[in-house]
């Protein structure tokens, strides 16, 4: 087996930054949603009204994409620490990526379906 | 005082076990190392590393009641009985409390722990202003005892790929040095997903450092410099 030389894969900083930037977007969205809740938006009709505009749909999709990217980095980090056999780690990576892609498609369907 | 000490001699023992000792010692102003020296007189099969016996050499780092520290500067009076002594976690045990630190020093050497300066040496020293020298405080004091690195789960899981808090503190010690000219190369060397970025800022290193240094802060400074370099 050929051991990987770790120095040279220069995406450490990129992923670390991405995790922080996506987290910031999620905080802003969470505050926005908390604001909607405080405005006593009750009932299906009121929520449908909030999500009717393209702005809220887009912001929600941005939030979800940030969440999925954030989750990908986190899940990969877990695999880097705990899943050592190549076959197990590769399968886990593929499953996570496929799941997150399905979630993305599903999110679009839900957001633009209502 | 009661002690429970991790014992393992790979030539004789099938697996490690804990041995209990009852030592007639008045804690007074004594340090844990004093007790260990007495234990060794009672039972000369016990293996321990020690040298300077005053917290400067870092030889007697061990896990004391679940926490890494130096036996020579840990007051006996501060310890709850039975005092449980184990080798530093995450490194192979050579015998009893003596661990094989090869992996630790491999990581240390990987960060090139020396000044890189290609200018011809001046007639006297390479001078620093007091302000430049100030940057090295809190970094140069590291004695490489290994308490922080072996308390770090990221090092336990990836000892061959993650530099560890001690090595990263040393890396920053040379990055922060005004006389060093290899800052960019040093940052390049740490920019992959393992060597620096396995640190998830849980700060076990800061918690255990017997010299009260702050590797997490040094790691933060390295990340800062990398980010600023993007612009």
Image: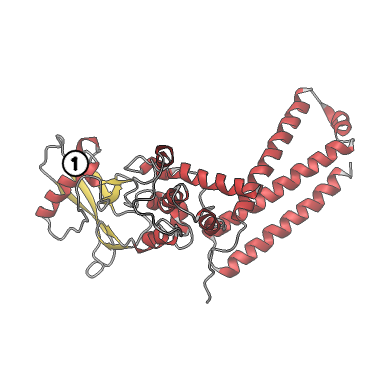
Return the residue nearer the eye: B39 or B18.
Answer: B39
Q: Residue at x 67, y 38 (%)?
A: A24
Percent x, y for residue B2?
Answer: 18, 43
Query: B63 left or right of B228?
Result: left
Query: B215 left or right of A77?
Result: left
Residue B169 sits above or below residue A24 on the image = below
Of all chains, the one bearing label 1 is B
The crowd level at tag 1 (other Cα within 10 Å; few <14, some 14-19, many 20+) is: many
Return the residue nearer the eye: B126 or A32.
Answer: B126
Q: In which quarter of the image is the N terminus of chain B?
A: top left
- In the picture, residue B30 is in which quadrant? top left
Q: Which color scheme is applied?
A: secondary structure
Camera sees residue B82: no
Percent x, y for residue A72?
Answer: 66, 53
- In the picture, residue A78 is in which quadrant? bottom right
Return the residue nearer the eye: A107 or A67.
Answer: A67
Hey, which residue is sitting farthest bottom in the picture?
A1
On the image, numbered disc 1 is attached to which residue?
A: B31
Percent x, y for residue B68?
Answer: 33, 47
Camera sees residue B183: yes
Q: Which residue is drawn at 23% across and 52% down?
A: B5
Secondary structure at numbered mark 1? loop
Query: B6 left or right of B169?
Result: left
Hey, which residue is sitting farthest top in the picture?
A39
Q: Which residue is drawn at 66% across and 50% down?
A: A71
Residue B192 sits above or below residue A61 on the image = below
Residue A54 sits above or below residue B229 on the image = above
Residue B189 sits above or below residue A31 on the image = below
Return the residue nearer the eye: B51 or A62.
Answer: B51
């Amino acid at each position: 087996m050929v051991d990987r030389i770790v120095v040279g894969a220069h995406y450490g900083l990129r992923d670390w930054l991405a995790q922080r930037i996506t987290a910031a977007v999620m905080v802003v969205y969470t505050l926005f949603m908390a604001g909607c809740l405080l405005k006593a938006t009750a009932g299906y009709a009121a929520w449908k009204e909030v999500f009717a505009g393209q702005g809220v749909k887009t912001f929600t999709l941005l939030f979800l994409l940030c969440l999925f990217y954030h989750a990908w980095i986190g899940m990969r980090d877990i695999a880097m620490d705990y899943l050592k056999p190549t076959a197990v780690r590769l399968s886990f990576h593929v499953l996570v990526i496929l799941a997150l892609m399905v979630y993305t498609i599903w999110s679009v369907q839900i957001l633009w379906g209502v | 005082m009661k002690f429970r000490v991790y014992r393992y001699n790979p030539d004789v023992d099938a697996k490690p076990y804990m041995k209990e000792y009852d030592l007639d010692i008045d804690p007074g102003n004594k340090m844990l190392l004093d007790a260990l020296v007495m234990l060794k007189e009672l039972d000369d099969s016990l293996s321990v590393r020690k040298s300077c016996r005053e917290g400067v050499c870092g030889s007697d780092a061990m896990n004391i009641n679940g926490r890494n520290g130096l036996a020579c500067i840990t007051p006996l009076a501060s310890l709850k009985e039975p005092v449980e002594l184990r080798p530093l976690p995450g490194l192979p045990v050579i015998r009893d409390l003596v661990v094989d630190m090869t992996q630790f020093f491999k990581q240390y050497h990987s960060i090139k722990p020396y000044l890189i300066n290609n200018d011809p040496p001046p007639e006297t020293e390479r001078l620093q202003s007091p302000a430049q020298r100030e940057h090295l405080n809190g970094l140069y004091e590291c004695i490489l005892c290994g308490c922080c690195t072996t308390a770090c789960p990221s090092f336990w899981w990836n000892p061959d790929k993650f530099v560890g808090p001690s090595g990263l503190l040393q890396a920053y010690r040379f990055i922060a040095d005004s006389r060093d000219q290899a800052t960019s190369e040093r940052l390049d060397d740490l920019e992959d997903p393992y060597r620096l970025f396995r640190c998830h800022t849980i700060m076990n290193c800061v918690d255990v450092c017997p010299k009260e240094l702050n590797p997490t802060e040094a790691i933060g400074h390295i990340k800062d410099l990398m980010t600023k370099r993007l612009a």
